[in-house]
Image (tube, grey):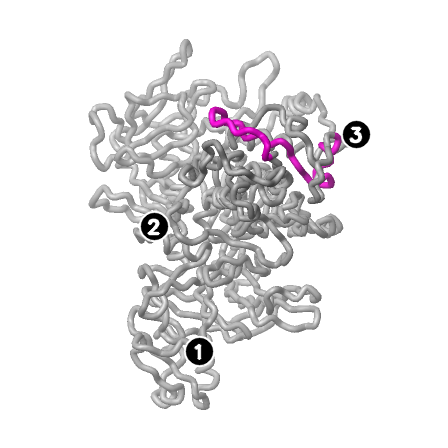
Amino acid sequence: MLLSIYFKCYSRYTFYHRNNDQTFDCLYAHIEYSHQIDSGAYLTLSHLIPFCQQFNENDKPNENVENGISFEDLSRNGISSSQLLKWFVPIDIAEEYEINSKHSNEFFYNCSFPWFGSTCQFQLIKDEEVTFGELVRFIFLERDSPSSDLDFPIGTCYLFLKNCIRGPSPVCLDWREICNGVNDCIDGEDEEFCALLEENRCSNEEFQCVRSKECISRTFVNDHTESLDCLDTSDEKEKFETEFGENCIKFPTFECEEIGRGVRDYFSCGDGQIKLNLMPRFHAFCANLRDQHMTKTLFTSFHYISNVPCRKLLMCYIRPDRIHFLSHLPDEIHCELPLEHCPLKWVVFPEYPILYSTFQFVYFTNRSISLSTDDITPDLICFNAIRCPEYVFCSIDIEIQHGLHCCRAFDILYDPIDTWDAFQLMFELIFQNCFKIIQSDTSLSIDENANSSVNLWLNSHKTFPFAHFCDGQWHIRDNDESTETDETNCDLWPCNNPYTRCNQYLHCWNAIDEVNCPKDQCGSDELYCKDEAFQIRYCLPRSFLADDHTKFTSDRYSRVVHLINETIGDVRNYFFWNQTKCLTVEYSNRNDLTRLVANNNDACLIPKHPKFVFPKTMIVMRNKTDLCRAGSTVASNYIEDRPYLQSAHLGYFPSIVPPTSHQSTMVQSDEASPIDLHTDEVVSWYCNRGFAIFYQKNRTIKCLCPPSYFGSRCQWQNQCISLSFQLKYFTFMYEMPIFQVILMLIDDQRQISPYNEQTIHVPKRDCGIKYHFYLLYPSRPKNSSLNYSVQIDIFNRITLTHWA
């Protein structure tokens, strides 16, 4: 059944009641982000994410139902399917009514406010007048790291490697840990068959992702650093080799959910974020604290030692109570002599060799315990020789029948281990030694004369884009004897000109070159400013901005500008931007001392910047609190190379935006601010990456899960298809077609999966949109004996003509 998927609803929401083998009630979140690309155009990332709850056949209409009417009675009274949709009926029920209204025994249940659902069984925990996509986005933005007070486990697990043991329960595998170069499963199931990825071949029109090896369209390569199409992010070079995803705790969309970096030395946080160094980890934790929870489990799980005195002895050897987030354990650890006798010759920690995915410690039980020292160094370090052949040279036989090789600790260590923090630092290097490889004689040679040849080329070409002059970067020197460049005497140039306007860089220190810009959608004489952490955009009236010239210094990375809602300090210290025509910087060549100066010259000029010292970003503060940030100043080294005049840079000339009358000094934003939900932490985290709602009158919490997850608390990672595509429509005729795009998953037996999606594409409106969709397999787990493909059909929505 194909469903219409775009709707806007407030307070009450329309469910998709999907009648498949596994029936679900779903709410669709439509979330979009827009990013400007090098050409000056915008790339919009459009996510359509169903949040679903498996339908309970035992749900019966209850007191939340205002009235129940049969399809037959509805038809007799002339009620149309359009009217049902206005009453927030599940969409497929409205479609069923449209198809078979006169011959159906189905009932429609009209829900009393604020209940919704096929039997009026659900209610929002926080009911706000926004679209469901906005509500999902705001609730995720409200998330902070979970506290230790929660009485339920947090995190998600991949279940479909049946024999994988990741560690003591509830430690489990994240799908991103599959084929990452590290044996996260004890027996290595997660790295089995990964070599087959190397056999994948891409066509000439495709780009092969560096580590994950899938093929993507070359159109998607380097299209924007926030538009990640390879699982390993290698299609966007700037994101390639750094820690990633620190904000994924707040984003439920593809850029987090569909990223698996596959980097050997990094820990996967389970939501798209990665952190340097493997488990156990003792500082710089994931935002969702997956690594901390796993480390806690590791250091509190000793059930594998059945003898209680031996268990207590091991705890005295490893001292988990000295780990800062386990400081509550001293009451459970008693190391005062004499200790009860342990009949074993040695004890091992942990149960499996999972320290840095490879190692296990052995402590002899006849070693002494000194309460005056912090030494937690083991007697032996054991490892799998196939995974770490580097240390086989020191292997000794102690008759431990566990398939591991063991070395005396100081054959591997270079210092004693006195804290677990020190362990993390030591084993980072020891783990690297396990992967030593012979370097190839073939390497990329670098031409040492490349720079000089480039300079020769530049010096021999006296023509280059006019806009390179005074754009803040050196492009050319006249000759080796001269100190003049294309940036010489720029303080004689006006800072507001057709080449500098609306390019997101503050050439003028009072931002007159960055107001009245069409792309910002701000009012007249308003400056665009953005809070990157919460993705909130502001339009700030320039009349409310001011510099404190007594505190100005150029040797900071950021320049602080004040939003004057209240007078801060001595008003005489401020240059108000609406009281002076120009702002500039004056400095002494002798000692580079700088000061901010206001004047009323006919034309504002590009300031003379001191060499090597200048602020690159403008921070707007309100009442001593950071509000947002505006683009870099002209002195920044990060100005993008767009040397040609573009009409978009001219701004409104003359202005087509009506003047805005500001009656108050409140900040105006072109996007709704995050709703003050005061969401209880239990509600925020109970459903993991899902969305919590109330169920029935007893207000039980139920979870709506996105396609990547399933389970009562969305605690299991799902198998699904993630699909990204763009449509480009070219025509020489004046027409405005509307296309219906239908996505279907089909197996090699030509069976169509019941889980399909669709969208409406209007080329004139949707040019530049990259769509992100999910398709579910027809069974869970998927049938591995079948091959699946995605079929995309495009119809002209008006003529019903099949286009592609």
**CA gap, disc 1 and disc 3:** 67 Å
The tag on residue 674 is 2
**Above-or-below relation of 559 to 674:** above
Q: Position of residue 34 (x, y in %)?
A: 46, 49
Residue 517 is one of the magenta-drawn residues:
no
Identify the magenta region: 365-393
Crowdedness near tag 2: few (<14), some (14–19) or many (≥20) residues, C-alpha within 10 Å: some
Residue drawn at (45%, 77%), measured in percent from left and top? Answer: 57
Tell me the crowding category of disc 1: few under 14, some 14 to 19, or many 20 or more residues within 10 angstroms, Cα based: many
Q: Quadrant of residue 432?
A: top right
Tag 2 near tag 1, CB within 8 Å: no
Q: Position of residue 388 (x, y in %)?
A: 70, 37
Mark 2 in CB contact with mark 3 (< 8 angstroms): no
Query: Quadrant of the rendered structure where residue 475 is?
Result: top right
- At label 2, the amino acid type is Pro
What secondary structure is found at the residue carrying circle 3?
loop
Is residue 793 shown above or below 156?
A: below
Decide if residue 266 is on the left or right side of residue 503. right
* Residue at 52 percent of width and 32 percent of height: 420
Residue in front for this viewpoint, 486 or 696:
696
Mark identifier at residue 441? 3
Q: Secondary structure at mark 1?
A: helix
Residue placed most toward the observer, 590 or 93: 93
Q: Which residue is mark 1?
A: 93
- Circle 3: residue type: Asp
Judged left or right of residue 419, residue 587 is left
Q: Position of residue 319 (x, y in %)?
A: 49, 34
N-term mark: 2 or 3: 3
Residue type at tag 1? Ile
